[in-house]
Amino acid sequence: MTYSLLDLLALDFVRNALVAGVVLAVLAGLLGPLVVGRGMAFSVHGTAELAFAGGAGALLVFGTEAIGWGALVGAVLVALLFGALGRAQRERDSVIGVLLSFGLGLGVLFQALYTGRSANKFGLLVGQIVGVDVGDVLTLTVVGVVVLGVLAVVRRPLLFASLDPDMAAARGVPVRALSIVFAVLLGVTVALGVQIVGALLVLCLLITPPAAAAQVTASPTLASVLAVVFAEVAVIGGIVASLDAGLPISPFVASIAFAIYLVCRALGALRTRRRVAVTTA
């Protein structure tokens, strides 16, 4: 029996996946510009690999119901370490590289030892919207509200510390504490993203939309708004496209986000040329 796209959109698991995707895109869009501004793109990748290891370990020991919590524990633990390293770029990158490879290897080992459905293992890497149920949506929503609440409280000093950490520290802003808080928020978001888009491509959701927004605006507020919009388009479009094609969600999310980035980059280059032409006229 062949199902149309409208038939698929009427299914409960699809609606659950769409709601989860909307919440995740909001979190990714708001945190993404800060990730880019703080030079933490590599940290996202390292956190995703440890979230993958935590999720794979939970799958092996406790079953599919514990994947989300395992990914959350793995991501938050490594995020705390990354946050404690602050902005010491050389030290942070080397530690991230070490932990990234360790997490990937550990996750692969846990997956090899798991004897259940291969789809469960595959979903950790590339996402699996079929496994998103009402409980996952509720958990994601509650955690998302908490993350947004904390971000609303610390956003202004965090933005100051991201743009000019030395001046922020001189003004009495707790730069190191804010780094740890932000790293935990990022770890939670990455862990949630692993369940939907997978560990391999969660980076595209947190980095590509804000990178695209940065091409067309220098305003931090407008960049955050655009990053949320771009992330929403990528996630919702990726879910719908994956349903129609019967393939994993992550390549569609990555492709849509990349297309948005290319368009924004072209618009940014055009705006720069026009500004130069006006200046030299």
Image (cartoon, rainbow, N blue to C red):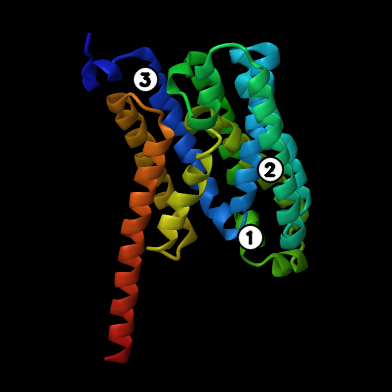
**Label 1 belongs to which residue?**
162
Amino acid at dot 1: Ser
Residue 168, given in percent of the width and then of the height, sits at 71, 65
**Label 3 belongs to which residue?**
14
N-term mark: 3 or 1: 3
- In the visual, does 133 lie left or right of 7? right
Rendered image quadrant of residue 54: top right
**Label 2 belongs to which residue?**
100
Label 3, secondary structure: give it: helix
**Badge 3 density bin: few <14, some 14–19, many ≥20, Cα 10 Å:** many
Q: Are marks 1 and 2 in contact (CB under 8 Å)?
A: no
Of tags 3 and 1, the one toward the viewer is 3
Amino acid at dot 2: Leu
N-term mark: 1 or 2: 2
Rendered image quadrant of residue 56: top right
Q: Are marks 2 and 3 in contact (CB under 8 Å)?
A: no
Residue 31, given in percent of the width and then of the height, sits at 55, 47
Amino acid at dot 3: Val
Of tags 1 and 2, the one toward the viewer is 2
- In the visual, does 120 lie left or right of 223? right
